Structures are given as structure tokens and as C-alpha cells.
Image (cartoon, rainbow, N blue to C red):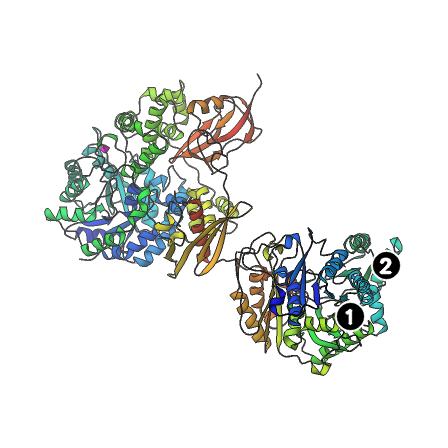
Amino acid sequence: MERIKTGMNITEVLKTVRGTEGYFITNTARDLSQSDFKNRILLHTDLLAAKTRENANYFSLEITGGASVHVDILRKQVDPFLKLELLRERMPNTMFQTLCRGVNLFGYRPYPQNVIRLTVREFAKYVDVWRVFDFMNHIPNMVAVFEEVQKAGKILEPCICFSTGPEHTDAFYVSKVKELLDVTGDEIVLCIKNHGGLGTPTRIGQLVKAIMDQYPDMVIHYHGHNTDGNDIGRITAAVKNGAKIVDAADHAFTGYYGPPPILSVIQDLRGDGFEPAGVDEKAVIETSEVLRSEREHYEYFESQFKGFSPTVQIHKLPGGAMGSSFEQAVKGDFLDKMPEILHEELPKVQIELGNYWSVTPGSQILWTTAVNNVLGGDRYGNPTGDLKNLLLGKYGPFPFYQPPDWIYEKVFGADWRKVLETEGGMDDIEDMDIDKERAALTKRLGSDPTEQQLVIYLQHPNDAAEFYKFEEKFGQVYVLPPSIFLRRGGFKLGQTLKFKDHDGKEHVIEIGPKEKSEDGEWNIYLNVDHHERVYLFKEKQAAGAVQEVQLSREEIADLAKAGDIRAPFNANVSEISVEIGQKVKPGDRLVIVEAMKMQTPIESVVSGTVEKISAELGKPAKPGDKIMKITLDSN
Amino acid sequence: MNEQRGVSLQKKILVANRGEIAIRIIRAIQELGYGAVGVYETPDNDALHIRVADEAIWLGDGPRCDYLNIDKIIQAAKKAGAAAIHPGYGFLAENPGLAKACEEAGIIFIGPSAEVIQNLGDKVTAREIMKQANIPMTPGTPNLSPGEAGVQEAVDFAKQYGYPIMLKATAGGGGRGIRRVDSEAQLRGEVQVARAEAKAAFNNDNIFLEKVVLTPKHIEVQIIADKDGRTVHLGSRDCSIQRRNQKLVEIAPALIKDRKLVDEICETAVRAAKAANYFNAGTVEFLVDKEMNYYFMEINTRIQVEHTVTEMVTGIDIVRTQIKLAMGKKLSFTQDDIQIRGFAIEMRINAEDPQNNFMPEGGKTVVVYRSPGGYGVRLDGFVYQGYTIPEVYDSLLVKLTVHGFSWNETVDRLRRCLKNYVIVGPKTTIPFYLTLVQDPDFKAGDFDTSFLETHPHLLDYEEQGSEVNKLARLIAEIHYEKQNSYAI
């Protein structure tokens, strides 16, 4: 059997897969990292596993895309392109796979055509398999990506997102497949994207069969999550009914919300007489041996709750959003409300909002709405900007039915029909002036950016600029192992840290004493490769010196009535919409804050003049932090 | 305690200075078997010179005023029973008042007489003396007349010789009190400003003009004379690499191919010293232009920072000789005894940030200090690990002097020493020097006083720029913050 390897075009891939007995496996490392480790698995760890993963002969390695591009620059401080380059050096044959959110790319809202095309072109230099989806299963949202992937000669793998409920019939999905093929042509790998791990094995088997009956030559790639602990059952049912490629992950790192272990899948299917095509099981086992000792360093990023969550069949949150939802509940101190949110409110909101597919960015809208509904007490009384956009059809038409009128009325007021009429429907997003953006980035960096830097910047301007400055200051930190980079707590005096840099040269850093100087600076002594160095840090304000008064929602609302605008929750300020001296009236947008990938505009509730702006663009704000001051009109 | 060292303390010498030069002098005093008396102001409580001295006398809270207080110095010498005072360089070294006060108090002043200091310190008088001795000089004026008349004299002079010209404070020195003027309009404006500045800086508002020698080499000659007028030169030095008239790198001997010319300059220096009735050690400074014309500039009536390079190539301990001559001894060597052997380079390692306009790093603590050593290496410093650099004095930490048989060997040794240095805490001039010693023009010995202006790229070095240091900074931050704020 010929292995699937880089450089094969779609025709060769399809021919090989169709002509091979058994099934293929994609190592879904990215989705594992996102679902069970909040996307924090470092490049250092992936590099450790590179050799054995390469030897394992997978159909592909999903290693980029989804939220990972953003988290790479925001938290892991690694260049998403450099990451691919370094992995490619060590894995010359394995196809790299990405997960692309169609028009939303690797972000959370629609991008202009020219940005989409530029981004796909740049990433296609490294990425062989393009899994593309749209949370509304709205095919036009994916067309630009499809075209660029095909132009680049890469493997196109469009998805139909899967969910459960009376509307989610085989007939519906088969018709969606037809719609897809009409756009892409026959030469695709079709992904059944079961991001929640929903449905029974039987249900998945039926769906695969229904598609295969209609399109007997179809190469189906089943993607699922093990949130309920039963994805192996679904995988097996998919393969038995004709799926040729399935997703799983290295068992040393498998958790509760991501893909199931590769070996377990192999063993289960073996019982039914199916063999994984070309997979070297020894290399699969070796990978986990290499990785096992690394897992402890990621403990902090694992879910607060251990154990499978079979109630996913009720709340339908995608595996990739489970960990962050619990994290948000802990940080927002509403853990006690979680049963109500997950098992009562969220299913209700799902149905009310059209029973579309709970996956990014649609899943965040459902989740945030459910949380706001429960915490705010007033259902749909505190709509986010993204919910409004959803209702206005900005993401695409509702697949089965419109949400009821009362929700529109609640969100847009009595005139909602007029609002819907004038503002409803998908916007033609104007092309971005890329040269202007490039100039802006040049100014922020102080030097000419590369095309790759520009691509990342176009999607996440503030975070990208901060990251490139970080890189300048701290260098290529991907060489640091998680035991150092993800360290919580200081190091021990005399502790020796060893790591190899990107040239493979070993470095030794010994932790020396900390000492406070007379002017309040802290001197941190390190012995860096046998040379003593000292690093100075300014003493931070003592805890308590900063007023850590937590304001309640009511207090924040009251202050807003007095023109004292405060941050409503932990958020980044993503837009400041007014200037000092500007007149504002109730309903005028003052700032947009962004939290949990959702943008929320803060609007004025008063008439007055902007006197002072305390918020800083791109900077985080805690609940109660001053955003701006408005002097009320004296009447 | 000093008895325990088995040293006769019949004679003590007071060192009226601080820093590396105080230590340099104390070493010579101690080698001669005398007792060394140090003095200090309060900010120098932790300074090394008072630790190596046999005894130390506190002058006052300073800063800089007590080291400059002649009465206090004389009182300290009397209190300690010092027979002589060595002024070092800077502070009171070229103040005829100290020499005079010593004469009056019956204390030996280790240096020329008050009269010689006075005459040579006054640039105009010095020029007159040299003129009579037929020493080549740049065209210049006497002291300008006060008021408008002086301005007119200046304008007339400039018309005759052309711009640019130098406007100099008569009482200035060490690169201070000098300004370049490029046009008549500028000259008319600057005369009064220069006068006011001279008054403020030297308590003497006399100023004069000199024709500018464009991009000259700064060549100087170390001379030494006994009381009987025996005058010997110890060869030449090249101090062309300067920043705003402050010397950074000093070399012995001068790198001029025409050795006959160098000999002629040295002999001229001896004539100049004799003309001034010079006694003890001094330096005659010349400018040498592109056409290899040389012009007398001034005589410095003190030991100089860069005396070490001359010591390295001649083997003569200049400070020891100074003391012996002041004690009435005759010169123990003649001109024929002086052989120049190899090359020496001195670099002033300052606690300054060259990339920030050489901003002094005073107030910082030297956390790590590791110095180079080995063959042909000499260090004159007063820095030690744990030393906090006072903000109120100059930023010189240590002078690195290397000696080699050939110019190339000397430069190689210098580069090696600079690389061997580990100084953590303040920024220093070391990384800048490291780029300098690797510059092709420097290595070829091809430089004049415009070197820094024509080689601005020398400041483009990367401060501890290696990747591992960047990473270590992040590790230090994780350690300090107790978590990586970028990885939460």
C-alpha cells in the first residue's frame, strides 16, 4: 500500500484511499490540545513527538487551525507559521491538516474576501489538508476558502456539521452534501463534523450509510469528540458503514472532551475486522511514551472537572468549548449555576435560536446568551453584539426556522421588524485596504512586516502586534519546555534549567538569589551558560494598594447612569468608539469590549460629553475598571 | 597596624584624589616604603582607595567640594604628618593654589611649581612662552579684550585665517572650555557666551581664538624633568580617538609612519618643557594635520590618565619617578636610556551607556565583576564586586592597558581582554570598545580626531543580544512574577 504523504494531489489521495482496504487515521493533536488543554500544548511538546508521529503513517496530523492560531500568538507566544515550518523539517512526509472556519477563518467573525484569500494562500504553503466548515452549514460562507485551497492544489475537505434533533435528518444532510458538491466538484474528502460528539453510534452509522448510498465513491472522514465517552462506538459505526478516515489522538494526552485514543480505536475496529491502513502501532505507542512525562506540566490547563460529560447530548456544547466554559464559570463565580445553564437554559436557547450547529462562533453565541439569560435574570435582556448579528442573519440564514418574534422584539425593541428589514441579511464585507494595514503594522513594529506577519495581524491586530514585540524582546521561546514556560510559582534557588535552543545548542540556566535593592527594585540573579546575569524588576504595588473592590452588576449599571462607565466583566477593550469632548446620547456606542471571543458594545445610557477615557485599546479590563467618564448634560 | 607591615612610616605622602589614580599613586608610595594617606568625602565611604591607603582622612560631606578644598587638604596633610602631597589628575592637580599652599606650609608638592602651573595653565601665557622658544603653533590671538573690542578682534582674526576657528577659555583644559565656530554670525554670538561660561567654569573669563586644524591627530609627549633642568621625554602617545574632546583610547607610541617626525615632535616637546622651566612629569600636546605639520597645543602640568601606556612601552614608573624627583632626587636615567618597546593601548572602561549618548550609569551596583588577566595586561581600577558607583563623581571604573610586541598583537590582546570582561550591573563602554577594536580602520591604525564622527556605526552594537539572554530574561520574569504572565 502506498502511504498518504505530502505532495500528493487530491486525485492521488482519493485514488489511494479508495483503493486501500481498511481505514485511515488522522492524529487530531490540535483538537486534543484545544478541547482538553485549552489549546496550550506547546510546540516544544509537538516537536518531541514529531519523529514517532511521522513514523506512525497517519493520513494527516491536524496541528493548526481552529482557535490555535490565535492562542499560538496570544498565549503560547509562537509564530503559527514558524511552528509549521519547524514541524515540517522533522515530519517531511506527514500531511498537515488545519481546521478553517470558512468566512470566519481562524477567528470569530466574517473576514473580507481579500483577507480570506491572502490568509489561505499563505497557510497553504504549509498546510496540505484543509478541513473547512461553517457553523450554519451555509455553503456560500466557505466558497472563497474552497477556491483558494483548490487553486493551491491542496486537499479540500469540506464539512457538514452534524447535530441532533428532529430537523437533523439524513435527507437534510444528503441534500447539504449535494449543495457542497455543486460548488466543489467531486474531488473532495467529505468530513462529517461531529464537534459535540452527539448522537448514538447507530445514528452516525445511518448518516454515513445514507451519504454512501447516494454517493458510493465518497471518501468520508469522520470527526468526533469523546465528551460522552462513547466516540469509539460512533467511529466504529462510521467505519463499518463506509467512512474511510477517522480522527483520534495520542493516548498519553487524551482527556474527556477531545478525540479518543488512537490505539483504542484500532483495537475496537480490529474486533470487527477492520485494520488501520499503514499505521505503525509501535510508533503510536512510542509517541505516547515520549509524551507521557510532559502531561503533568499542563495540568493547570486541563478541565476543572475530571470525567466524561454524557450530558453533552443535552447541552450540545462542542468539545473544544467545554474546558473554557467551565473555566469561565469558575472565574466568573457561577459554577453553582452550571447545571441550570447547561441542562435547562442552553437546550432551550438552542431550540429558540433555530437549532443550528453549536460550533464556533455559533456555540459561543448560544453559550453567552444562556449565561446572560441565567445570570441576568432577564432572558435576552442583555444581548451581545454577536447575538444581534446572528438574529439579523449576518452569519447566514437560519437553516430550519427563524427564532420567534418575541426574541426579536426583546433584542431590537418594538421596531424590530423595521430593524430586520433595513439591517437584516448578510453584509457584503468590503475588501480591506491591505496596503494600509501593512503600513499600520510597519509603524507598530518599526520595521517591514513579512507577509506571514501581515496575515496574522489582519485577523488579530492587537494580539499580533503585541506578539511580534514579545518575540523581539524574549526571542524564540518555543525552545522552552512546558516545565519552564508554563511554570506556576517561582523556581527553586539553585535549580538548574536545561534546554536546547532552536539551533540545538544546549543551554544551562541556574536560578540564583533574589534581592531587593534600596530603591525598591528586585534583582534576579541567574547564571546563564556559566555567566552571571542580573535582571531588574520594579516592585509592583503591594496587593491592597490597588483598590480591588468588586463592583456588582447593579453598581456598575448605577455608575453608568451617572456617566461613570465601568467594565462589566473581564474583557479586552477592542474598540474605543468616541473621543474626548464628543457629545453622546443614550444608545451611542462608547466602546466595544471582547471576552470569550464575543464582542459586546457598551452603549451610553445618558446624554453628555466624554470627559475622560481611561480604557486603553487592546488592553484588558477587570470588572469595575474605569472605561470612561461622561459629564452629564445639565438639564 | 602599619608597623606590622614592617614599613617605616617616617615619611607619609598624602594623595589628594580619589578613584583609580589615588590607588595608582598609593601603590607607588607604598613601593617606595612610605606611608600613604588617603582622603575622602562621604560619598566615597566605600571607595577602594581609602581601603588600600595606610590611613584615610575624612574631608567632609562633599560631594566634589572637599576634594577641591585646598585648606582641608593642607589640614589633613598636617594632621597626618604628611611630608608631601600628590594631587593626581583633575580636582586640584592644575590649581596653582594647592602648589602654593604647599610651599607655604612646608609640604612638598609632587608636581611643578605654582608659577609653572600658573603660566602653563594660562593658555595665552603658555603660547607666548612657546612663541619665544620657536615652538610651532597654530595661529591664535592673545586674550581677547573685554566687550565689543574683543568681538572685533575675534572677527578680524577670523577674517585673516578663515573659519572654522576655536574659541577657547584661557584657563580651560582637559577638553573643557573649547567651542568651534564656523561663521562670523556665530562668532559674534558666541564670544560673550563663551566668556560667561569660562567665568562660571574656571572663575576666569579670559578667552582667546585659535585657528582650527581640521581632523588632526592628537599626539602628545610625556616629559619628565628634575630640579636641575635635566629633561627627558618618554616618547609619544596618540590620543586621537576622542568623544567631544574627551579621550577614549590612548596609544603609545604615536602611529605615525614617519618616525623621524615623531622624534622631532618629542625633541620639540623637550624644548618646550625647558622653555617653561618645567619640573616633574608633564605632557606636551600637539595637533598633527594631514600634511604632517604639527602645532603645539598645551602642556598639562600633571600626571595624566593615559600615563600607563607610556609606562608599558618604556618600563619607567612615572609616578614613582615623580615622587623621587619631588623629594629632591635627580633623574636616574638619560634620554639614551629610554627605549620604546612594542605598543600599548589603554581604554577607559566607564560606567556609561554609549548608546544613550554615553549617559553615566552612576548609582548602579556592580553585581558581578570579573576582569581579564594574563601576559601584557594591566588594570588600574577601583571597582570591585558589590561596589555602588557614586552618582557624584566621574564614571571611570577601570583602565585597561595592554602591551604587545607588535601593533597587531596588541590589538588582538585588547580584544581578548574586552571579551574576557564580565561586568554586570551598570552598562559600560566595553561593548562599544569591542566593536571599535574590530573596526578595520582602527586595526590599520588609521584614525584621527574625527574617528567617532566618521564611524557612527560603532555604536550599533547589540547589548547582550544573544537569544539565550532574551530567554533568560523571560525565565527571570517567570521566577519573579511566580508565573508566566504570557502563558496564563
Query: Dot 1 corresponds to which residue?
Result: B296
Find residue A15 and report its horizontal and vertical position in percent: 20, 53
Q: Quadrant of the N terminus of chain B?
A: bottom right
Magenta residues?
Answer: A303-312
Where is B370 relative to B314, above or below?
above
Residue A522 numbered tag: none
The foreground one among A293 and B112 is B112
On the picture, is B231 further left or further right than A492?
right
Expressed as whole percent of the image width and height from the top left, the position of residue A570 reads: 42, 33
Q: Amino acid at mark 2?
A: Leu
* Residue B88 shown left or right of residue A307 in the figure: right
Residue named by callout 2: B144
Within-10-Å neighbours for mark 1: few <14, some 14–19, many 20+: many
Question: Dot 1 lies on which element?
Answer: strand
* Vertical order, A355 against A51 (above or below): above
Q: CA distance from mark 2 to mark 1?
A: 20 Å
